[in-house]
Image (spheres, helix red, strand yellow):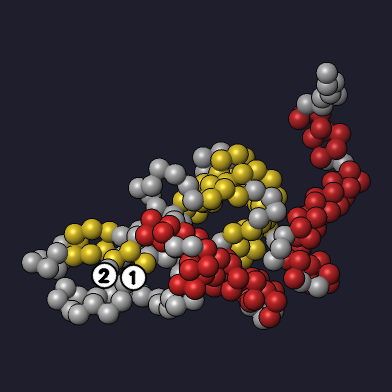
Amino acid sequence: DCRLLVLRRDAFERYFASNPKTRVYLENVRREHTMETIARDPLCSLLEPAAQRELETVLETRVFERGEDVYSFGYPSDALYFVVSGELEVWMNEDNPRPVARLGPPNSFGELGLLMKRPRMARVRVLERAQLLVLRSEHFERFFLGNPKALAYFEGIRSNRAVQTLERIPLFSYLSAEELSTVRGLFTEVVFEKDDIVCRAGEEGDASGWVHLATPASRARANPSIPRASTWPTWFFVE
């Protein structure tokens, strides 16, 4: 069995929250917890100890309840998030009933939008009440974009996500792991801005496209102003 001593919130606030000495102690505990989270995160482990201590001073703490969105499609990419506690789901497609990933400690997320300087292309929703550390974009740039180790880490994440995109496409399930790795190296990643034309009806096709991020729309030839269909990550077109 388990026996607990329970102190109600009003009593805690009366005897501890308003006591200057205990408030200093609780703040030190909070800072130690933050430093533990930073030390466990793969990205932050690339920083020198002095930089980790400096990073702790600019992090904000936020709590999200179950069912809340940390961010969703089209939100500005203005922060990187570190998971202290709880569990979150990542959705790449609003019409897909299943999330593509779950996140818990010591994961971080949100770096892709910061690196690409583009609005969010995913939804991150809280599955279990979550406490997050928030690093704003200006601090992200200062601590990580000038760090060669961090840039190599980001490139590894980008490459892994591209491979995961291919693995989810039925066509590629017919390839061996060795063939998939070889084909991955043949791809060129091209970024198109909103309303850019990827290809036109009637043009000679010289490539196939796989949607890695975002949502292109195909349009009927008879009336190009009307979108015919949308394609989502892991879909391919101009085959």
Residue 221 vs residue 108, the one in the foreground: 221
Q: Label 2 sits on what residue type?
A: Val
Cβ–Cβ under 8 Å for marks 1 and 2: yes
Indicate which disc residue 99 carries. none
Q: Earlier in the sequence, mark 1 or mark 2?
A: 1
Q: Amino acid at mark 1?
A: Gly
Left or right: 172 as drawn, with respect to 146: left
Percent from the top left, x then y, of residue 184? 48, 72
Q: Which residue is at a point 89% across and 43% down the rendered structure image?
A: 22
Quadrant location of the N terminus in the rendered image: top right
Left or right: 120 in relation to 115: left
**Which residue was labeled with disc 2?**
238
Would you identify the image quadrant in which residue 149 lies? bottom right
Residue occupying image coordinates x 65% and y 63%:
135
Q: Is residue 8 visible?
A: yes
Which residue appears at 47% of the width and 59% of the height? 167
Q: Nearer the viewer, residue 92 or 116?
A: 92
Question: Whole-percent x and y of residue 164?
Answer: 50, 60
Identify the residue shown where x is 12% and y is 68%.
221
Which image quadrant: the C terminus? bottom left
| CA separation in Å, label 1 and label 2 | 6 Å
Task: Decide which of 149, 130 is in the foreground and name it.
Answer: 149
- The part of the image, by quadrant, that contains residue 109 is bottom right
Question: Residue 206 appears at what percent x and percent y?
Answer: 27, 79
Which residue is the site of mark 1?
Answer: 209
Count of numbered labels shown in the rendering: 2
Q: Is disc 1 placed on a helix, strand or loop?
A: strand
